[in-house]
Image (cartoon, rainbow, N blue to C red):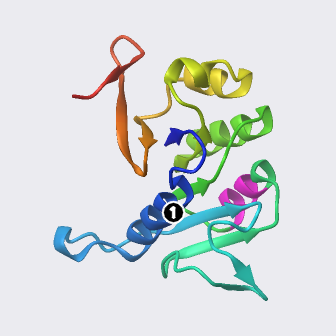
Amino acid sequence: MFHHQGNGKTTILRDLIRKISNGIEKQNFKGINVGIVDERGEIAAMYKGVCQNDVGKKTDVLDNVPKSIGMNMLIRSMSPKVICADEIGNFEDVQAINYAVCSGVKGIFTAHGKTLENLSLNPAIGNLLNMHIFERIIFLKNREIFTVYSIDKKNLDYKILE
């Protein structure tokens, strides 16, 4: 999920985490283990070890830890099915995401960018995009989905979903 600042990406990320963790009864989805690396405390808002924001009952949170270190710690010790982090953007984050994918862990990540081309200008995120590991890339505008890209595994390219 990518977009420019102030469009609710952290709020949407938190809501997705809660749904994945708690499950969705209407779809008979029981929920799965989620790990959050909350480097700046914006997702779970931990206070004395307790989440102040509802991030779900099957969610583990590492607070105030660099994303790259936290993702590796979660994978090794907490067995998450999904790892989430807000505002990825450096090469260490990319290495940790690649390690997660190679370990069989799914991920939901946010970053700042207005277009796919704009994201590619960031060397680390451009590198991550070139790995073609994302199933979906979602851009938000005014707190709503603006554009959705899907990976075309055959051509290893991203195409806009209509």
Task: Please say whether residue 72 is one of the residues in the magenta stretch.
Answer: yes
* Residue at figure coordinates x 63%, y 63% from the top left: 36
Q: Where 91 falls versus 24 (above or below)?
A: above
Q: Is residue 124 left or right of residue 161?
A: right
The boundaries of the magenta stretch are 70-77
Say if residue 81 shows up in the picture: no
Q: Residue at x 55, y 74 (%)?
A: 59
For the C terminus, the image quarter is top left
Is 9 in front, or is 152?
9
**In the image, residue 8 above or below residue 63:** above
64 relative position to 55: left or right:
right
Q: Nearer the viewer, residue 80 or 66?
A: 66
Does the image show residue 29?
yes
Q: Quick one: SS at disc 1?
A: helix
Q: Residue at x 49, y 43 (%)?
A: 1
Q: Which percent across, then down, holds residue 160?
A: 32, 24
Q: Is residue 96 magenta?
A: no
Disc 1 crowd rating (10 Å Cα; few below 14, some 14-19, many 20+) is few
| Kind of residue at disc 1 | Thr
Q: Position of residue 49 (x, y in %)?
A: 75, 86
Q: From the top left corner, tell me how far across and down residue 139 is, in percent.
A: 44, 37
Q: Which residue is mark 1?
A: 11
